[in-house]
Image: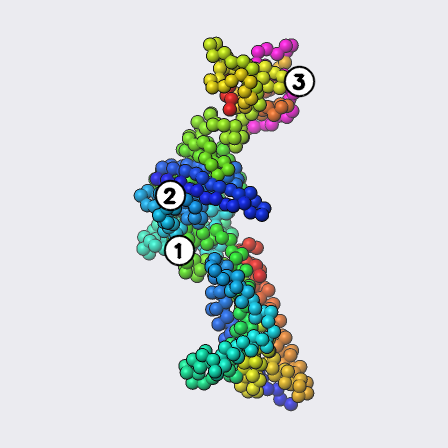
Amino acid sequence: MSIDWFPLWLSLRVAAISTVLALGIGLWLAWLLANRQFRGKEILDAAVTLPLVLPPTVLGYYLLVLLGRGSPVGRLYEWMFGGPLVFTWQAAVVAALFHSTPLLVKSARAAFESIDRSYERAARNLGASELRLFLRVTLPLARRAILAAAALAFARSLGDFGVTLMIAGNIPGRTQTVALAIYDAVESGNGTSARVLVLIISAVSLIVLTLANRLTTNPYGPRQTAL
Amino acid sequence: MIQARIRKRFGPGPESAGFSLDVEVKAAAGITVLFGPSGSGKTLTLESIAGFVRPDEGRILLDDQILFDGEAGVHLSPRSRRCGYVFQNYALFPHMTLRKNLEFGAERIPRLERHRKVNELLEKFHLTDVSGRRPHELSGGQKQRCSIARALIGSPRLLLLDEPAQGLDAPLRTELYSILRQVRQEFEIPVLLVTHDFEECLALADEMIVVREGRIVQSGAPRKIFDQPANVDVARLIGLYNLLPVEIQALDPGRNVSRLRFEGFELNGPYFPGRLIGDRVWLCLRPDLLSVAPRNGRPGMNQMPAALVRVVERPDRVRMEFAGDIAVEVDRGEFERFSGVKDWVIEFPQVGLRIL
């Protein structure tokens, strides 16, 4: 009996793209939460955490409403790319993104906050702009913690089930990720396929998380990063 | 020339009493030391001048530029103040080599000029050989020199140092002091340094400002402050005196004498203008102005019998500590002359007695 490798390939691709996007959005949010005081900060903080605690179906429902063919965002997407977003593999990326970004924000914020303030003060004192401070000091000092956070986000993207099911569906060969394929395989009594995919996804996640843990040991002493 | 008038209040928190800072600091080229205990507001003053902290009120003027003006709402960002700052933990960027650390502070200087300037400072601070290393590969002294070099790279108009000698051993301290004297000579800018070590003030300061609980209690040349602490608080901060609680028993302006009482012992001193009989004051005496003698029969005038508690060896002197918290410092030769003596008297001078 042959195993369909498409779900594995799709999952890896979705997780990779969503991790890159999550880094862009997540680092910005984390920096904002770690360094700026503004009104509604608590609400933003809570909102960012929300996807971690909500049932995936609830998150998926929101996204479906937000991105569906009838919504403004959905229509804008359709107008720009000539097709609907929902029930495509791109929707699976969005699902993974919402599923994993909160974790990345949490870790990156902790990493930013654990950087000794005197480094930032020193950089400003030496004439650095906020952008240069971020690129040349904050980011390099938090580099390992951020890579670790990205690894966590990647692993979490791989593991999403509910949100993907809600907005990308479970279309074999198009939007069926590993998690969905395993569910299908178990449902249809295809034990071999389920076992192989389960083992592979576990192994990949284990490797990624081991890497993440190794990254959190800091070369400059214990003070600057923590996860 | 830096002139700063800074006020800042912190309301009481759940675990801390409120604190208010209200200081006026003026410093010309040369080394000015802010001296005070921890929590007195000296570092906060430095941070306000550097722009890390925004005061509630006041005005900070560096040369002719306004860095902060509470009323006009001016608060320049730290990056445009051109104040060199040496952090207590050095804050050298750990991911950059020493050379990169310096270059980071010289980004505004044109490339060729920058290269020359970085090399010049590396040379001056004897760091050329280790310029390719990162901070964690450097010795304490090298880190120290690098942090000062980095603070100076942008040709600052003012150099601020936050407890630079904290945690350094004696040879490194000596080295630091000679570096700072070199800086004073070669860069004609005000150097403002924070410390709680009075000997550092004596070693370095042209001017000294004593800060306590957010207020300035005395300022002047360190030697002068040492000779004449303004009040008992300053004397306690300096920590080098015998402070004895005495009561004034008699005052005679005509003969310029007074009589003081300390724990049942009577002492003759000079007339103290502006004091009244019955006043309880502090007698402030440097340990080296007292002397000791073996006790022979009745103690003479201004000789107080005292029990020796401990002898502390100093490099060139011996510090004898007596019961009642009185310390006397004598030359080694004098101390050895008295070897074997069991009963002592402390001799108080009659002139030069200071009360606070």
- The kind of residue tagged 2 is Arg
**Is residue B305 part of the magenta span, yes or no?**
yes
Task: Say yes or no: labels 2 and 1 on the same chain.
Answer: no
| Residue B334 locus on image (x, y percent) | 57, 18
Q: Kindly give the residue lying farthest to the bottom in the view shown.
A: A1
Mark 3 — residue? B342
Where residue B117 sits: x, y (%)? 35, 50
Residue at point 48% right, 72% down? Answer: A21
To which residue does mark 1 refer?
Answer: A128
For mark 2, give the secondary structure.
Answer: strand
Give the residue type at disc 1: Ala
- How packed mark 2 is, by other alpha carbons closer than 10 Å (few <14, some 14-19, many 20 or more), is many
- Per the image, the residue denoted by label 2 is B59
Do the residues bearing badges 3 and 1 touch, measured as CB atoms within 8 Å?
Answer: no
Q: Residue at x 54, y 23 (%)?
A: B282
Tell me where residue B325 appears, x and y as whole percent: 61, 25
**Magenta segment range?**
B296-314
Please give the chain letter of the residue carrying mark 3: B
Tag 1 secondary structure: loop
